[in-house]
Image (spheres, rainbow, N blue to C red):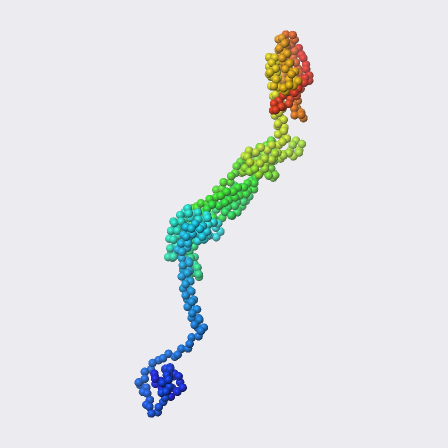
Amino acid sequence: MKFCTECGKPNPEEADFCSNCGKTFQVNDAQQTANPTSPPPVAASVVHTPTVPPKKPMKKSSKIMLILAGLVAIGLISTHFILQNMYDPMKKIDSMNTAYNNQDHEAFFKQFTLKKGTIASADNFYALVSEYGWKDLRNELTYEAEKIKNKKPADMIYDTGEFISITKKPVVLGLYQDVNFTILPTAVTVTPPLGNTTFHFGGEEITAAQAEESVLIGQFIPGEYKWSFESTGGFMPLAGKGTYTLTPDESNRQQLDIDWDFTTLYLDSDLEDATVYINGTSTKKKVSELSEIYPAQLNKSIKIQAVSKDKDGKEVKSSEVPADSDEIYLAFEHVQQEQQLTEEIAEVEDFYKGFRSDYEDAIYYADFSYIENYFKPGSVIRKDYAKFVSDHSTIPGYFYEFLLNDVTSVTPQSSGSFELLSYEKFNYSSYEDSPLRYDRKKKYVISKVNGDYVIDAIIDLDTKKTKY
C-alpha cells in the first residue's frame, strides 16, 4: 500500500494516481509503503483540496475546426465592414463626384438608376446635370441621402419637374440599406397631322393610324434626340427628319412640337378634268379637285402627271413634272400644240392686218419703205411691190379708200408656213379713171424667219370691179 500525500488515502502499490483526489504519485511516494510499525497518518490533519482530472490531448481535427471557426468570425466581421462601406450612399456620391470631374459620362451615369422602360443616354444626362449645376445637385443628393441613413423620409429633387428620387433599397436579407438615385423620365407624345404615319424618336418607333392622333412614344430623360417620319396618309408620300431638344417639364409630360416642313402645291393643267397621278399611282382626283395639295413637300423624286383621253377616246398623258416647285403645270403635248397653233394663227392674222394698214400708207405716199420689212430681202415679191408702190407717183390724182380687210382662213402648211385667205374691199379713183370698187379674194403665203413673219407670195384668186 502507499498513501497519498495530499489526502492520506491508502492506494494500491501499482496505482499511478490517488483514487480519491487524483494526485499523481511521485517516485518518492512510491517508496513510501505501508509499515506495520509506523503509525498511520492522522486523518484529522489532512486538508482535502479538489483537483481537476487530467485532460486528454486535443485531437487534430478539433484544432482545425477551432481555427476555421476563428477565420469565419474574422471573415464575417470583415465582410460586415466591407458591405457597410459598399452600401454607404456617401461613397456612391463620392464616386459620382470623381466621374463628373473627370468628365467620364458613362461612369457618372452608372451611379444612377432608371425606371423600367426609360430611354436615356450618358451624354444627355451629363449635359442635363451640367446645366442644372453639379455642385448644387451633389449637395442636394448628400442632404437627402443623410436622411435615409438617419431613417428619415427623403424628398424628391426637382428640375422644373420631378428630376431625381432618393429611395432606400434593402440588401443582403435586409441587413443593410442601399440607396437608389433614380432619374425620373418625361412621357413623350406626338400628334402626326396625317394617318398612316410612322414616327421614330430616340430609337423608338410608333405608328399613328389616324390623323391628329396623339400617340405615346415612351419615357425619356431630357436631352437631344434624333427623329424621323414617313407617311402615306396623304396624296403623296411624305418624309422628314431632324433633331429635337427635350426640355424638363413641370408635369413630366411633353408633346413634341415637330416642324413637319409641309407646304401647299398649286396644281394646274391644260385639261382640268384629267386624273392626277403621283409616282404612277392614281389619286382618283381630277386636276380641278386637286388645285391645291396639302400637306405636301418639295421633293424632286416625287413625279406628278395627269392622264386624260383625246377626242378619239385615246389615252393621253401630260408631261411628268417633279414636285420641286410649289406651282406645278401639267401640260399635254397635243393641247400645247393646238394652243401654239392658235397663237400662231392669231399672230399671222395680226401680221396680215398690219401689212394692209401699212400698205395703205405706202400707196398713199408712194413710199415703199412703209412695207419693205414685210418681205424677204432680195425676193421677187419685194421687188415687184417696190415698183408697184413707186409707180403711183406717176398717176395723177389717185385715191384709195380701204373698206374691208377680212381674214377668211389661216391654214398651217407642212413646210411650216401658213396660207391665209382674205377678202378685201376698197375704192379706187384717179383723174384718168372713173371710181371703181374692188372686191378681191387673195391668198397670202406667210412664213417665219428668225422669229419674224414675212410674205412669200400674194396670189389674186378673184377680183370683181364695180363702178360706183
328 w.r.t. 375: above or below = below
Answer with the quarter of the image where residue 283 lies.
Answer: top right
85 w.r.t. 313: above or below = below
315 or 460, which lies in front? Answer: 460
Q: In which quarter of the image is the N terminus?
A: bottom left
58 or 185, which lies in front? Answer: 58
- Residue 59 coordinates in the image, percent (x, y): 44, 75
- Residue 367 coordinates in the image, percent (x, y): 60, 14
Whether residue 373 can be seen here: yes
Most distant residue in the left direction: 45
- Residue 74 coordinates in the image, percent (x, y): 41, 65
Most distant residue in the top direction: 431
Answer with the quarter of the image where residue 292 lies.
Answer: top right
62 w.r.t. 95: above or below = below
Count of numbered tags: 0
Answer with the quarter of the image where residue 315 lies.
Answer: top right
Q: In the visual, does 99 lie left or right of 460?
A: left
163 or 64, which lies in front? Answer: 64
Q: Residue at 68%, 15% (x, y): give it.
A: 463
Q: Quadrant of the C terminus?
A: top right
Q: Residue at 54%, 43% (x, y): give it.
A: 230
- Residue 322 coordinates in the image, percent (x, y): 58, 36
Most distant residue in the right direction: 462
Whether residue 283 can be seen here: no
Q: In the visual, does 353 lie left or right of 117?
A: right
Q: Residue at 69%, 18% (x, y): give it.
A: 461
Q: In the visual, does 252 lie left or right of 47?
A: right
